[in-house]
Every structure is written in structure tokens, then in C-alpha cells.
Image: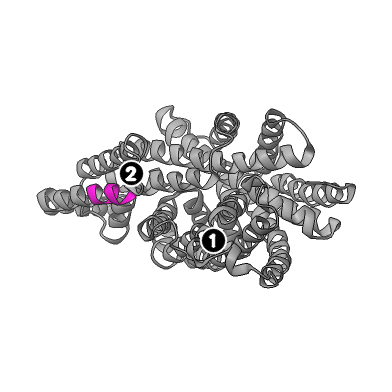
Amino acid sequence: MEVSFVHYLGMFLVVGITLGYSIYSARSVKSADGFSLVGRAASSPLVAGGIVGVIIGGGATVGTAQLAYQAGLCAWSYSLGAGLGFLVQGIFYARALRRTNLETVPEFFGLHYGKYAGPVISICGTLSMLCGCVAGVIAGINILSAILKISPLAATILLAALVLMTVFFSGQKGSSVTGIIKMSVLWVGLLVGSAVAVVSLYELPDFSTVFPQEPWLNLFSTGTGQVLGNIFSTVVGICCSQNYIQALYSASDARTASRGAIMAGLVVIPVGLPIVAIGMFMHAQNPALPPILALPTFFFTYLPDWFGGIAISGVLLAIIGSTAGQALGIGTMISRDFVGNVFKVTSSEGILKANRITLVIVTTIFSTLAYTYLHSTVLYWNFFSFLLRGGGVFVPLTLAIFKPGWLSPFWALTSIICSTTAAIVAKLAFNVSQPLFLALGISLAIVALGVVVSGRSYRAVYINAQAEKQTDPV
């Protein structure tokens, strides 16, 4: 992969201007709410930008091209599942979540299932988002080390610094701004790039020989159950994820939150198709290329230098913004649900400081993990991340939204802990291909048992508690 001065110039200008504006936007951040929720004044495009800024990262770009280079159309399953997840979230979940005026998913669980539910959800959410961050950083390390001709260690340090620059000062606003800019740049690069790739693929004289129907043109080539499971796990994980729900909480009202999620879904669904075309084109042109470098090599080799530099900046911003958004989600949960509740830190300045310190710590952790597992598959980490988010959380979250007061704290905690543990053990110890279905089955069974055994008696307690809150003069 040859990189010219013009490549570097286009890349550095776009990335530098975007990160510079992100830091500049920090001038309006004066409180913890302003840092993590943009003061609850975000418009629908800003909400969508915050969501897209997280989901379109290393997995949706470099990881998709990597898998498309190896197996073809099945790589689209990631962005397809993500887009469907945001549509489901926008239609069914966004309004109810935004009306609570909370800030984190653990707070929501604490409201419905007692004080012990919040810390448990924080642990599950933190582990899942760490896996998501690892996926993005693996992609970023490979790209930066190849482009800048530096060691993987140096690339890891540089990427960690860029991630912190995105959100350390400006928080959610910086993540949202980066999301909007990166999608604009990335979409232009992908549209032009996919046009080049599709035309070149069409003109291949032996297309059917190079890319037979199986596996290249079959969305379910890796197995119908496997692909549908990946899509479903992504949908479920998105509905439960702090980093996407945090963007909903930042909306000015419930309707804006719903519109923002739906806008994000409509943007995300098609974004994988151009990348699949590029990955397949690179397989035809250079079958010996390391798959993880398929996308950046295409931009630098088959587009004009100035445009290739700008296009690759969109990929880098995607990786940086997505990782930064997930790190911000972790920081918000830990600062609110651990530092705030456990250590009784209630001042806005104290929460803001804890959030920023947490950002530095978690960035160090996931950067170290990514460097350690540098040669693993990017999308593996993404799908495992969504498994951890949704396996034990989705059923009790959905019940709390649509049927609040039906499940007691004891049964909710039992469901979360047992189903999440089962999913992790099934995946890591027994290598079950789709442990999400096992986790959801266990969760649903425990929740159903809890509703039958103690649902009626707990509903009476819940209704009385709500009535007392409404009549409380405070």
C-alpha cells in the first residue's frame, strides 16, 4: 500500500479539523449533564449523529470489508442488524426511555428493579462495551501502522490519544459532532468507491468463476442460523446498550429521541453494501492481501490521491468516534452508578471529574487488550459485545418498559445474572455458535416464573410506591 504526500495531506486535514472542532465544542460544557447528555437539548440529527458515531466504527467499516474479502455478501449482516436494531429502538423503546429523564441504563433498572440491579447492569454493560472498543482499536492499529509505517505499539498509543481527544473535553457533543462529520465524509467516499468497485466487478470476464453463488453472493453462506443469530443479537444488543440509549437521553424530548433513532437506522442499513462490494473487488484484484487492509488499500490504490486521503479519513474518524462513544458510555455509567451512588459523589463537578478519569482508565484497558489480541477477527468482538449487552438484559428491560411493576427485583436480578453467565460460559467454554438464544431462553423462563409466582403481589407494592411518589410534596 503506497501512500503519497497528497494522501497524508487530505487525511490529516479532515481528521485534524474534525477533532479540532470537537475540542472547540467543549467550551459549552460546564456540567456533568452537559458533558454526557448535551444538556438534554439535542435535535434529531444530533441524536442520530451520536448513535451513528458509535455504531459505524471498525466493525462496520474495516471489519465488514475484511469479512467480505473472505466470504462476500454475508458481511452485510452487521450493518443490516444494526440498522434494524435502531428502527426497533426508535419505534418501540426511545420514547419510553427518554420520558424517564434518566442518564444511564443502570439507573433505569434501579428505578424498576431496586438498588442492586444498577451495579449488575453496569458490570454487564462495561464488559460488553469494552469488547466493542477492542474491535475498533484492532482495526485502527492495523490501519495506522500500515499508513504511517509505525509499529503496532506506536499506533496503539496514537489511537488511544485520538480517542481521548474526541470526548475527554466535550463528551457527548464531541461524539455527536464527530459522528455527523464522519458519516458525511464516509458516505461520499463509499459511494464513489463502490461505484468504482461495482463497475470493475461487472466488467470481470470471469466473475462467476471468481465469485460463485456459494458462498460469495449468499447472505446466509455461513449458515442461516448463524447469520440470523448475528442479526438478532445485534438488534437485541442495540436496544439494551448504554451508548445508544445515552444518545436518546440527550434528546430535547421523547419524539426527538424516536426520530433520531429511526434516522440512524435508515442511514446504517445500506452502509454495509458499498463496503461489501469493495471487499469483494479487492479479493479479485489482490487475493494475497491481508483481509483487514482491504478497505484502506482500495482507497489509496483505486481513487485519486486527494480523494483517497479524504475517504480514509472517514474510516479513521469512524473508528475513533465509535470507540470514543463507547468509552463515554462506560465513563457515564461508572461515574453515575458507582462513584455517584457508592461513594456518594453528587456534585456536578465531582461527577464530571470522575467521568473524565474513567475515560482515561478504560481507554488504557481496551487499548492494551486490542494490542494483545491484534490478529483476531474484528467482527468476532462486535458480535460478542452485543451478546453480553442483550443476553441477560433485553427481557427485563422490555418488561419494565411495557409492563412496569410485573417483575420483582429478586426475579429480575436472578434472570440477569443466570442468563448472562450462561451466555458467557456457552461461548467461551463450549464455543456455542449462538449462545444468545440460550441466554434469552433462560431469561424468559426465569422472568415468566417470577411473574407467575410473585407478579400479582409485587404489582400491588409497585403501584403503592408510585402513588406515594406522586403525592410526596418534595
Q: Is residue 271 visible?
A: no
Q: Nearer the viewer, residue 468 or 145?
A: 145
Q: Nearer the viewer, residue 30 or 45?
A: 45
Amino acid bearing label 2: Val
Q: Residues within 10 Å of mark 2 (few under 14, many from 20)?
A: some
Question: Upstream in the sequence, badge 1 or badge 2?
Answer: 1
The way the protein has been coloured in the rendering is one colour
Q: Which residue is mark 1?
A: 252
Q: Is residue 298 visible?
A: yes
Question: In the figure, is residue 113 to the left or right of 164?
Answer: left
Query: In the rendering, which numbered label is found on residue 389?
Result: none
For mark 1, give the secondary structure: loop
Residue furthest right as drawn: 5
- Picture residue at 58% right of the left edge, 50% below the top: 63
On screen, 413 above or below 192?
Answer: above
On screen, 437 above or below 409?
Answer: below
- Picture residue at 55% right of the left edge, 44% below the top: 378
Question: In the figure, is residue 182 to the left or right of 270?
Answer: right
- Picture residue at 80% right of the left edge, 49% below the top: 11
